[in-house]
Amino acid sequence: MSSHGSPLARTPEPPYYAVIFSNIRNDAEPDAYAQTAEAMVELAAQQDGYLGVESVRDTEGVGITVSYWRDEAAIKAWKKNADHRAAQAAGQKRWYRAYITRVAKVERTYALGLDDI
Amino acid sequence: MSSHGSPLARTPEPPYYAVIFSNIRNDAEPDAYAQTAEAMVELAAQQDGYLGVESVRDTEGVGITVSYWRDEAAIKAWKKNADHRAAQAAGQKRWYRAYITRVAKVERTYALGLDDI
């Protein structure tokens, strides 16, 4: 997880959007990868319409990062960000064995214990 | 990850549904938890409308599991499954510090390298 507070995102009431990024890392450039990943988390958090992020990677290199956005326009604007584009290109060429990104509209939620963490 | 093939789910063309379960484990009953989690993955895979699952947990106990479903009806049927209900109750009382479940409609996807893994 990043160092930005709780590992569970405090999102508003639906509807809003989720970008589910499921991926497998290769073994290349762990430091460069970590630095870029952290920079992208920080940069995303500065974008208009950003609502939060949750990110987990296991010891086998499988990761799921879900970022949350107010609407489609916010996702599209973030997708066009130049630094983000450069990071994505590096990811495609150098850091990921495979990934799938799914854009989804969150319709309802159920939670437990969020006030305690 | 479970032992059920690739860590990335091979889902059909959208639209379909995602259930994003983001959670923090406590330290209780690791064996009982693991056994139930595995049983639920196997049981989910037998349900009508199930499309796949991706699941990652890091070394700090933060997990994200995303299951994919054909439609809302399939999610609702799975939610009513008696064994699933019992597992959820155990999770709420004994295994999770906190969680949030989000039900979302997948609208589009982008992938890289899925044929190679």
Image (spheres, coloured by chain):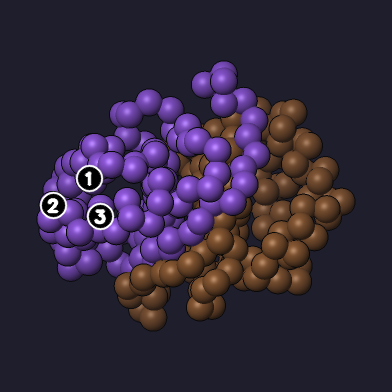
Chain colours: A purple, B brown
Cα separation between marks 3 and 1: 14 Å
**What quarter of the picture does the N terminus of chain A occupy?**
top left
Check chain identity for marks 3 and 2: say if they share one: yes
Q: Is residue B22 above or below residue B46?
A: above
Which chain's residue wears label 1? A
Q: Residues within 10 Å of mark 3 (few under 14, many from 20)?
A: few
Whether tag 2 and tag 1 are in contact, CB under 8 A, the answer is yes
Determine the secondary structure under disc 2: helix
Q: Amino acid at mark 3?
A: Ala
x and y, in percent, of residue B37 in the image: 67, 48
Q: Residues within 10 Å of mark 2 (few under 14, many from 20)?
A: some
Q: Is residue A34 above or below residue B17?
A: above
Q: Amino acid at mark 2?
A: Asp
- Give the labeled residue for mark 3: A77
Check chain identity for marks 2 and 1: say if they share one: yes
Image point (39%, 63%), residue name: A101
- Nearer the N terminus, badge 3 or badge 1? 1
- Give the labeled residue for mark 1: A40
Image point (51%, 64%), residue name: B106
Determine the secondary structure under disc 3: helix
Image point (18%, 47%), residue name: A36
- Nearer the N terminus, badge 2 or badge 1? 1
- Give the labeled residue for mark 2: A83
Residue found at the far right of this picture: B82
